[in-house]
Image (cartoon, helix red, strand yellow):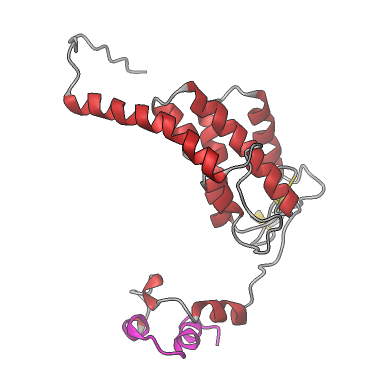
């Protein structure tokens, strides 16, 4: 390991560093009005009593995911304790909604799970010896090693994850059919898709006609 030793004293920090520290002091306290406005006393988000959408569990966690990161950058100790509190509260809330089981997503794609669990990753980075985090990390990993009989996500013969949607209740087939996906795309701007390398993509990107989703399906070889 290379060791770097600073020998030149810095008695006067640069102005940008002083201003950055002032900004962090303001951000340190900004969490309290945020919590007061958007959360209940138990830390759960102020929301309806039921959750009607399949999508969105990641959005709950994303409301607080960067709090442990701010702590790592120099935020106050309260940032870490509040980050723990909110992760626990959101997990309880999503468990009540039915999206989470055994503290983990029941079964969704890895893109959305990654949006949820960046919060958990940063908590582990900020508090790596916390026994509850260590236990959870091992248990969550076990969901993809077939250590939980309720979550046989891994196919050891083919060395792959069995379902595009996966989690604490095992593999699931994707819940959206091509027909359903086309219905969703009907209202989306064509520029939402990176189709620059697809043949005919120029016409697709500029089209706003009702037939655009069918054209997208043909481009993907699904129609």
Residue 56 lies in quadrant: bottom right
* Residue lying at 49% horizontally and 40% vertically, measured from the top left: 34
Measured as percent of width and height from the top left, residue 7 is found at 20, 8
Tag count: 0
Residue 204 lies in quadrant: bottom left
Residue 138 lies in quadrant: top right
Q: Is residue 90 above or below residue 167?
A: above
Residue found at the very far right of the displayed protein: 149
Q: Is residue 175 above or below residue 106?
A: below
Measured as percent of width and height from the top left, residue 110 is found at 58, 55
> Which segment did they paint magenta?
202-223
Q: Is residue 77 above or below residue 186?
A: above
In this rendering, position of residue 193 left or right of residue 95: left
Which of the two residues, 7 or 95, is positioned nearer the viewer here?
Answer: 95
Measured as percent of width and height from the top left, residue 210 is found at 46, 90
Measured as percent of width and height from the top left, residue 13 is found at 20, 18
Q: Is residue 104 at least partly visible in the picture? A: no
* Residue lying at 38% horizontally and 85% vertically, measured from the top left: 208
Which of the two residues, 192 or 22, is positioned nearer the viewer here?
Answer: 22
Which of the two residues, 123 or 46, is positioned nearer the viewer here?
Answer: 46
* Residue lying at 54% horizontally and 37% vertically, measured from the top left: 121
Q: Is residue 222 at least partly visible in the picture? A: yes
Which of the two residues, 56 or 211, is positioned nearer the viewer here?
Answer: 56
Which corner quadrant holds the C terminus? bottom right
In reply to whether residue 217 is colored magenta, the answer given is yes
In reply to whether residue 77 is colored magenta, the answer given is no
């Amino acid at each position: 390991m290379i060791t770097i030793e600073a020998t030149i004293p810095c008695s006067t920090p640069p102005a940008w560093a002083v201003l950055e520290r002032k900004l962090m002091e303001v951000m340190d306290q900004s969490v309290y009005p945020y919590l007061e406005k958007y959360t209940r006393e138990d830390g759960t988000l102020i929301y309806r009593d039921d959750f009607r959408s399949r999508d969105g569990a990641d959005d709950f966690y994303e409301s607080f995911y960067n709090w442990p990161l701010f702590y790592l950058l120099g935020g106050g100790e309260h940032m870490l304790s509040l980050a723990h509190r909110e992760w626990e509260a959101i997990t309880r809330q999503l468990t009540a909604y039915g999206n989470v089981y055994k503290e983990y997503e029941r079964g969704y794609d890895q893109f959305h799970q990654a949006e949820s669990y960046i919060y958990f990753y940063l908590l582990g980075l900020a508090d790596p010896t916390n026994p509850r985090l260590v236990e959870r990390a091992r248990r969550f990993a076990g969901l993809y090693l077939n250590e939980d009989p309720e979550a046989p996500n891994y196919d050891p013969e083919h060395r792959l994850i069995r379902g595009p949607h996966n989690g604490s209740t095992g593999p699931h087939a994707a819940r959206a059919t091509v027909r359903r996906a086309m219905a969703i795309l009907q209202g989306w701007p064509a520029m939402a898709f990176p189709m620059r390398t697809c043949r005919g993509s120029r016409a697709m990107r500029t089209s706003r006609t009702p037939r655009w989703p069918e054209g997208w399906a043909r481009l993907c070889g699904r129609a």
